[in-house]
Amino acid sequence: ECCADLGVLFDTDADRSGFILPRTVAKGSLSAYEPLNRNRLIALLSVIFSSSSPGCTIVTDSVTSEGLAKFLTADLGLEHVRYLKGYANVIGKAVEITESGHGNAEMAIETSGHCAMKENGYLDDGTYTAVKIVGLLARTYKTASGGSLLDLISGLQEKAEENELRMNVLDGSLESTQDLFDQFARMIEAHTEGQNKVEGWELDTENLEGVRVRTGGGGFFMLRKSLHDPLISLQIEGDSTDEVRSAVISPILDMIRGDNDITNGLDIGVLREY
């Protein structure tokens, strides 16, 4: 209502941030506001570093999109290291890369919004992230073209369907969570090759957490277990609900239908209802 140039959101302790930006920027008019978070936020911050530190390394968590990987490497010419989920993990990896001399990790960031930058001592600080975005906004508005910050990431391939399906382990034990996950993961991997291969499935062999499978056209799904809760999650990205249902959900339901350990040990209602 006030035609703001930028909306900034922080979590309670301000170590995470997110933003709202206008898609349309015209003289005296700002409209069609959209979120700047998750893959979008990583992409826009990386645009900043592609100018200030060409060829640097960006460390992200394991659930970032295929489109983001392409944008960072092919469009911006940066190195992308997709590491384990958890802000301490990505920060630790960034420090390791920089101190070892194997790269210059300017930023460690999770899709949750936790972000730590080398220039700020690798401190996860949402307020510092906000300063970077505000600074970019100011520089953009000073140029003749102006425009929305979202225009700077127009090359980022985004999927219309993004979801995380959480399946509870019914007996509530972490031991069962590990056993069920291992069994589920082996089953998925077995269906990425050979006679059992599901059409379009390609195992991501560089993935370091859980099991991640590309489904074509920039889509993917990833099965991972919680470290602290009796929970197994399925992260999915695709072009539409129908496409995800046919390319991911239906094949998974078919493969686990005869497995009593999984069907009796895991609440798969979210899969059946998708």
Image (tube, grey):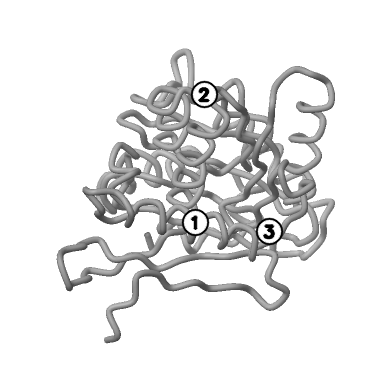
Q: Amino acid at mark 2?
A: Leu
Q: Are marks 1 and 2 in contact (CB under 8 Å)?
A: no
Mark with earlier residue (1, 2): 1
What residue is drawn where x is 67% and y is 43%? 108
Q: Residue at x 37, y 37 (%)?
A: 219
Task: Say if 51 sits above or below 227 in the image.
Answer: above
The reply to whether residue 64 is visible in this rendering is yes
Mark toward the viewer: 1 or 3: 1
Q: Which amino acid, mark 1? A: Gly
Mark 3–mark 2 distance (CA, rounded to whole Å): 22 Å
Label for residue 203? 2
Mark 3 vs 2, N-terminal side: 2
> CB of mark 3 within 8 Å of CB of mark 2?
no
The residue that mark 3 highlights is: 231
50 and 174: which is toward the camera = 50
Q: Position of residue 157 (x, y in %)?
A: 32, 39
Residue 192: image location, x then y, percent: 48, 22
For residue 29, side relative to residue 97 (left or right): left
Q: Residue furthest bottom?
A: 1
Dot 2, how many residues are within 10 Å of its Cα: few (below 14), some (14-19), or many (20+)?
Answer: some
Q: Helix, strand or loop at disc 1?
A: helix
Quarter of the image with the C terminus is bottom left
| Nearest to the observer: residue 56 or residue 64 | 56
Question: What amino acid is found at the position of numbered circle 3 in the picture?
Answer: Leu
Q: Secondary structure at mark 2?
A: strand
**Residue on which disc 1 sits:** 135
Foreground pick, 260 / 182: 182
